[in-house]
Amino acid sequence: MKKHESQSNLSINPGKQKESQVPYKDASLPISERIEDLMRRMTLYEKIGQMTQLDITLINTTGKQKDIELDPEKARDMILHHHIGSFLNGEAVPPRTWYDFMHELTRIAVEETRLGIPIIYGIDHIHGASYLEGATIFPQGINIGASFNPKHAYNSGWVTALESADLGHHWIFTPILDLGVNPLWARLWETYGEDPCLSGVMGVAYVNGLQNNDETTPYKQAATGKHFLGYSDPKAGWDRTPALLPMQQIHEFHRPSFQKAIDAGLKTIMINSGEINGIPALASHDILTKLLRDEMGFEGVVITDWDDIGKLVNFHYTAENFKEATYDTVMAGIDMSMTPLHLKFNTSLLELVQEGRIPEKRIDESVRRILKLKFELGLFEHPYPRSDRFERIGSKENRQRALDAARESIVLLKNENHTLPARKSSRIGVFGMSANSKRNLCGGWTIAWQGGGEDQYPADIHTIFSALKEEYPEAEVLLFGPDDIPYPKDAATSDATESSHACFIDKLNSLDVLIYAGGEEPYCEFAGNITDLRLPENQVHELKLLSESTSPLVLVLVQGRPRLINDVINDVEAILFAGLPGFEGARAISNVISGEMNPCGKMPISYPLNPNHYLSYNHKRSNLYFFDPARANKIIHGNLTTSLFPFGYGLSYTSFEYSELKLSAPSMAEKGSISATVKVTNTGQVDGRETVLWFTSTHVGRITRPVKELKHFEKVSLKPGESATLAFVITPDRVFYPDEKGSTILEKGNYSIMVGDQKQDFSIID
Ligand code: BGC
């Protein structure tokens, strides 16, 4: 940019042009022409405004994220004087409140600015429209992963769009394509699990459901794949802390879920707040431009995460000040800064361009992408929210979809003596901190960032206790609060305490089944950092006490990450992993307890066994190389279990048998294929659904290979005695893997394919 041009461009708002027939407003023209026409009309500061996203607190009368009411003067200041093109955030309020807010915000942008560029509003509706009162709330990502059914990821996106697109919520900060590989990480529950194939399939389904929902026409939404990339694998387990990831691992494990979503048309990507190999992802040209743009072919909008430019100064300490941090991130490749509480990004970027340090063509590149997004979403044609479809919010049909997802996401981990289903129970005791809680079932990003207060949850959703009462209308269902549970026996000091203890155990013995709902309370991001993965001590005490009874004890784990349960596993007869199943979760859990629903969820992560050793299922062979004193100083290899329940584990009330794994040929050439088929039979007494997981393993690899890798999965419903034959075609692209540059390596040699307990070898030959 030449000096005199930049000066003329700097006038803050050079008068509104009353042009109604300007080309960029003509919907019949190609988007590329409209963009160029609009770009020619924009000043530099207007362009920078398009690259900025500010928080709702700056334009809300309350100055907070809650109690939403637009302050028009504050909004005018931001939009008219600083040309801000995007806002974000909020908390759950009624649709009418959102409608009024978005309508006025839009009106200011469209009617009062000289170019009338509409606002794009971003929001964390991560499992349904979670910041909207009355909305349908789906299970969190970890449960969607456990369902192994992409239909539920699709429905989660589809219902989110249906319930919020009309309100002017254009930009949904989901799906979370990070891998849940570190069990301590406070955002594990936001992921679809630890496996790249599972995460990719679910991510694509979500993007299709949200972005291609034809029932929201003409309103459309953009999805956000986040947090690009490696965010979920911090070495020390805490949120936003450093990850050390060789490029080969990035290509092999962390890239594929993003790549699949990009290939499916994902419109936006949010960047990892943390550092990878010593460089904050946000300031890495290698990650943002070379990898994401040049290699992965992403053409959409790249946004920073919350105040991450500032974090280069006061968190990562890689930049002296905000201006230098702005330089680093813009030159690395971001398009939009979620700034979000000040205007430092705008002033810094303006100066950097004026000083000639950042070329204006770099700004134009990003602004073109942002305008393209706005044009593609139809915002220029349909900028205003609409209020005539509120009745779709929280509809019976949508809630049924959320219930279906929750029911398929519950994983039966243990079931000794056929404790479950507890069909005939007439006296049921319900215990634990999640027994009568709605918020615990939903986790963070529900109603508010860290989850709402218990009284903010809708009256018509169930807790586990109330759902069980409905499930068992004839039975006596008793709720035991913390005060009803005496302190554990070994702490009893007086006779009175001892007798109350005995009395309590007698009472338990008179019940048919004890349901203990434990786990975690809601948390989100760094607020959920912990130093000990074990189940909290008071829960262990309570479970030990309940286990003194002769009545069977069922542990329901309502939690966002796998709290270690070794201390109690032998004290309970049955275990359900319920994860964070959302508003319909209690009904799903009670349906499974009663047997109305035969559980079919499978673990989307490896449930750790040990406090100080956890591995994902797709670890290397050498990960299990250890010294076994029991075997007289022999070092043994690969004979140790690292997880309590492996990835893909989940029981059913029926049983399935795998047989007749057959391959169409024992080998294939580099361009060939082999068809594999397997027979799955329901050998039990009731209808059931089985997730059939196809794994491969490469016997010898130049770069060490995982012990096994999921390649394909499919769910099948079978009646007792019924069989189905399932097929999977192995092609070389299913088994090749990347080197550190991302180029593929196809090993000639031997492989295995595994499904259920079946295994066959095959080879790839010249
Ligand atoms: C989170 C993102 C979220 C953003 C906007 C950040 O703190 O890391 O996942 O989308 O806030 O609320």
Image (cartoon, rainbow, N blue to C red):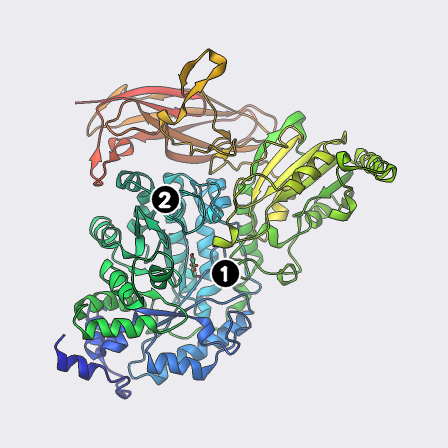
Give the residue at mark 1. Answer: 129
Q: Residue at x 27, y 77 (%)?
A: 46
Q: Is 389 above or below relative to 493?
A: below
Q: Is mark 2 within 8 Å of ligand 1?
A: no
Q: Residues within 10 Å of mark 2 (few under 14, many from 20)?
A: many
Q: Judging from the image, what secondary structure is the residue with disc 1 in? A: loop
Q: Is 717 above or below relative to 277?
A: above
Q: Residue at x 38, y 59 (%)?
A: 305
Q: Quadrant of the C terminus?
A: top left
Residue 108 on image: x %, y %: 39, 82
Give residue 740's quadrant in the image.
Answer: top left
Give the residue at mark 2. Answer: 200
Q: Is 270 above or below relative to 721?
A: below
Between residues 62 and 536, which one lies in front from this camera angle?
A: 536
Q: Is mark 1 within 8 Å of ligand 1?
A: no
| Horizontal relation, residue 202 to residue 519: left or right | left
Between residues 22 and 602, which one lies in front from this camera angle?
A: 602
Q: Earlier in the sequence, mark 1 or mark 2?
A: 1
**Does the rendering let one see residue 26?**
no
Q: Residue at x 58, y 60 (%)?
A: 452
Give residue 316's quadrant in the image.
Answer: bottom left
**Does the rendering let one see residue 67?**
yes
Q: Residue furthest left?
A: 2
| Horizontal relation, residue 506 to residue 341: left or right | right
Specify the amino acid type for callout 1.
Answer: Ala
- Work out how far the residue at label 1 is from the one at label 2, CA to CA, in angstroms: 22 Å
Between residues 584 and 360, which one lies in front from this camera angle?
A: 360
Q: Residue furthest top?
A: 632
Residue 324 on image: x %, y %: 26, 65
Q: Are marks 1 and 2 in contact (CB under 8 Å)?
A: no
Residue 324, which numbered label?
A: none
